[in-house]
Amino acid sequence: MTDPPGVALSPAEIAVPAGNFPEVRARFPDHVLDAVGDGRIWADAGPAALAATHQTWVRDPVTDAYLLDVLREPHDGTTWVFRHDPAIRLPRAEVVERTSDGVPRLAPDLVLLFKAKRPRPKDQADFDRVVPRLPLARRHRLAALLARAHPGHQWLTRL
């Protein structure tokens, strides 16, 4: 997440199917939702701003501190839809895995797929650290998805 000028952010980041966002919203009834997109923040976002963006910051109205960064991801029932290329669809069971503590997370190869759009130095560092640890099947999946979403991407030669 990029910090807007004058705002220091360190909230937890989660992704949820967009259709499940009302459940997240219900957990924070006394907080403000700010929609974020294209370098802009819509404070106390209404339905139109939320519909036009995919990222929401949950803000404490007393301290103005951001507590949670919620990415609202497209889905089709139990099928995950890649926001940058809706033709890329995978069963949710292949997209979400659990840490040793049972915390659900996006599969690391798919995290890299998101980072590939405009890789920053920290994204390159993540790629360099994660790819050698990926099982061969996940490396192949990342290569195939990168070739589709970002033909000619610099990472393809390393997969």
Image (cartoon, rainbow, N blue to C red):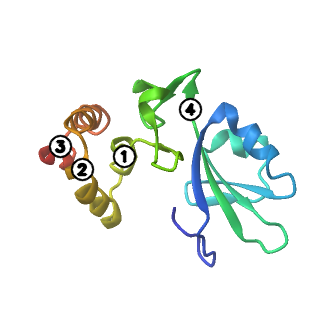
Do the CB atoms of the residues marked 2 and 3 lie less than 8 Å apart? no
Where the C terminus falls, by quadrant?
A: top left
The tag earlier along the polypeptide, 4 or 3, is 4
Which label was assigned to residue 156?
3
Which label was assigned to residue 133?
2
Give the structural element (helix, strand or loop) at label 2: helix
Q: Where residue 11 sits: x, y (%)?
A: 61, 64
Do the CB atoms of the residues marked 1 and 2 lie less than 8 Å apart? yes
The tag earlier along the polypeptide, 3 or 1, is 1
Which label was assigned to residue 74?
4
- For the residues marked 4 and 3, what is the alpha-carbon distance in whole angstroms? 26 Å
The one of 71 and 133 positioned closer to us in this rendering: 133
The crowding category of the residue bearing disc 4, from other C-alpha atoms within 10 Å (few below 14, some 14 to 19, many at least 20), is some
In-image side of 117 versus 34 (left or right): left
Tell me where residue 33 sits by quadrant: bottom right
Instruction: Give the residue type at disc 4.
Output: Pro
Q: Residue at x 59, y 60 (%)?
A: 12
Instruction: Give the residue type at disc 1.
Output: Pro
Q: Where residue 146 sits: x, y (%)?
A: 27, 38
The crowding category of the residue bearing disc 3, from other C-alpha atoms within 10 Å (few below 14, some 14 to 19, many at least 20), is some
In-image side of 40 versus 47 (left or right): left
- For the residues marked 3 and 1, what is the alpha-carbon distance in whole angstroms? 16 Å
- For the residues marked 4 and 1, what is the alpha-carbon distance in whole angstroms? 18 Å
